[in-house]
Amino acid sequence: MADNACARIVAYDNGRDEFRAVAGAFFENPTARLRVRDTGADRPTRMFDSCGCGRHVIAPRGDWRQRNRIAFAEAIVSFVESAARDRKFDHIMFVAPPAMLGPLRRVLGRVSLACEVAGIGKDLIKVPAAKLQVQLRRAIRSQQGLRPM
């Protein structure tokens, strides 16, 4: 489960029929909630019109939030890739808002893609642990949110 600011990996235990947190699998992205002015960036560059006295802002190439999101997705996927190499799971299911599913999908490696991979476009990262079991079961069983990646 992930959003732009944090991610946690849970595993389904068949014997107990429950989801449990994987030790050492909590990721934080402290720059995700920063505003542009807090990143230390300068004001956007301005240039004069070719004729007249008007000035306009030059839009920067690329979105720093998207680049940040992709870098965070790479950190998550590197953990998943190492677990996939060690054959710690058979199936992978990413539960994240659609804005985060795209970067996760883009950075998945060949090892992870060899497993059965699916994605659910929901933000369950802030759901309390007591309600998480019910929410995950409901999200997985509903065929509307389940899409192969």
Image (cartoon, helix red, strand yellow):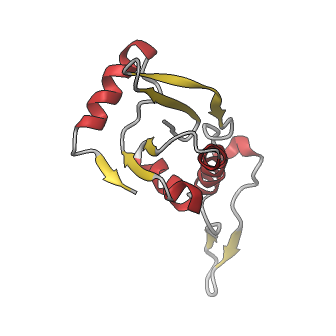
Q: Is residue 61 visible?
A: yes
Q: Quadrant of residue 143?
A: top left
Residue 109 visible, this angle:
no
Query: Residue 66: percent from the left, percent from the top?
Result: 58, 55
* Residue 112, position as x, y percentages in the image: 54, 54
Q: Is 25 above or below relative to 68?
A: above
Residue at 71 percent of width and 66 percent of height: 45
Name the residue at the bottom extreme.
Answer: 51
Q: Residue at x 31, y 21 (%)?
A: 134
Observer-nearest of 28 and 26:
26
Above or below residue 116? Residue 138 is above
Q: Depth check: 127 or 58 in front?
A: 127
Of 44 and 15, which appears nearest the observer? 15
- Give left or right: position of 46 versus 113: right
Count of numbered circles in the view: 0
**Farthest residue, direction top:** 130
Choose top left, top right, bottom left or bottom right for residue 138. top left
Identify the residue at horizontal 60%, vertical 37% (top origin).
Answer: 33
Q: Quadrant of residue 23?
A: top right
Q: Quadrant of the C terminus?
A: bottom left
Left or right? Give the position of 21 relative to 149: right
Q: x and y percent of residue 99 in the render?
A: 45, 50
Q: Is residue 1 left or right of residue 98?
A: right
Question: Which residue shows up at 68% across the image and 40% down it?
Answer: 31
Q: Position of residue 50 (x, y in %)?
A: 64, 86
